[in-house]
Image (cartoon, rainbow, N blue to C red):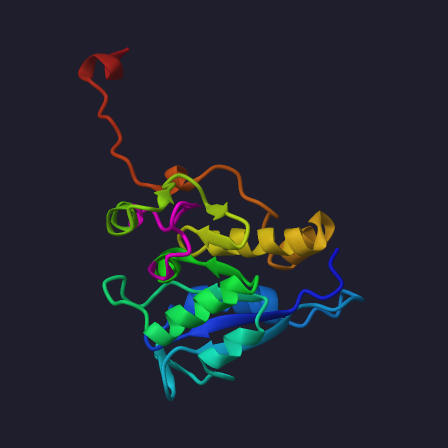
């Protein structure tokens, strides 16, 4: 168990993916009075100026801007607002600088496209939502895209699949920092298993073969 898990910075932006943002806040920003040791410190970092719109009609105001990423030990990137829109250059440079000094980056769903834009996934295995894996591989051919898994831990960078897989990835990071007993406690408070079995394939809709007349009459 580490003595100080450090500051977790969760990115917020205009057209924010509310659920994925909430996953990170729930796990890293929620008070944990059940524990008698220091939990993560938490901050929301604004990618855009002013109140930012979030899906569902909410508005978000953040604690700080990208300059705060210089203090973060962990940076969480929720699903990006538009995969075809490049992240701001200021954000790209801040993520590169954070990674260079040893910070961990964790993406949820299409947040992988933000980390991919930094070049920090080149030569590494990564994943994203199954709907976007082909696009990620096409746009960033130096990334080894794994479409089958719920998340990929490449050490300093963790990428996860669709929204709920972000919970799996975040709990995995808790286990890295605090061990399985604490990760299990966090999962129990979420009323979910510590780690789900299987991969993304179990959630992809596949056509069901129609039985022939001979099969039905058997």
Quadrant holding the N terminus: bottom right
Magenta stretch bounds: 117-133
**Quadrant hosting residue 174:** bottom right
Say whether residue 148 is magenta.
no
Instruction: Name the residue rendered at 54%, 70% in the picture.
Output: 25
Of residue 183 and residue 208, the one placed in the foreground of this image is: 183
Question: Whole-percent x and y of residue 121?
Answer: 40, 52
Q: Residue furthest bottom?
A: 50
Q: Could you tell whether 9 is left or right of 206 in the image? A: right
Answer with left or right where residue 43 lies relative to residue 179: left
Residue at position x 52%, y 79% from top?
68
Residue drawn at x 32%, y 69% is 87
The answer to whether any part of residue 21 appears in the image is no
In this rendering, would 7 be left or right of 134? right
- Between 161 and 59, the residue placed more toward the observer is 161
**Left or right of 197 on screen, residue 130:** left
Say if 41 sits above or below 109 in the image.
below
The overriding secondary structure of the stretch rendered in magenta is loop
Where is residue 204, by image quadrant? Answer: top left
Q: Position of residue 22 (x, y in %)?
A: 49, 68
């Amino acid at each position: 168990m580490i003595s100080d898990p450090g500051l977790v910075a969760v990115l917020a932006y205009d057209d924010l993916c509310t659920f994925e943002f909430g996953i990170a806040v729930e796990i890293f920003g929620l008070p944990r009075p059940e524990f008698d040791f220091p939990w993560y410190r938490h901050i929301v970092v604004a990618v855009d100026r002013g109140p930012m719109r979030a899906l569902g009609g909410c508005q978000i105001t953040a604690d700080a801007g990208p300059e705060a990423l210089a203090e973060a030990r962990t940076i969480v990137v929720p699903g990006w607002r538009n995969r075809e829109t490049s992240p701001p250059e200021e954000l790209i440079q801040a993520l590169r600088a954070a990674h260079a000094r040893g910070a961990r980056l964790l993406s949820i769903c299409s947040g992988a496209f933000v980390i991919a834009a930094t070049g920090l996934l080149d030569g590494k295995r990564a994943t994203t939502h199954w709907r976007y894996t082909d696009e990620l591989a096409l746009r960033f051919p130096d990334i080894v895209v794994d479409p089958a898994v719920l998340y990929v831990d490449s050490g300093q960078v963790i990428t996860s699949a669709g929204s709920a897989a972000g919970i799996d990835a975040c709990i995995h990071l808790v286990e890295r920092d605090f061990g399985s007993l604490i990760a299990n406690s966090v999962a129990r408070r979420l009323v979910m298993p510590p780690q789900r079995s299987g991969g993304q394939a179990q959630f992809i809709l596949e056509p069901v073969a129609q039985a022939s007349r001979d099969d039905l009459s058997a």
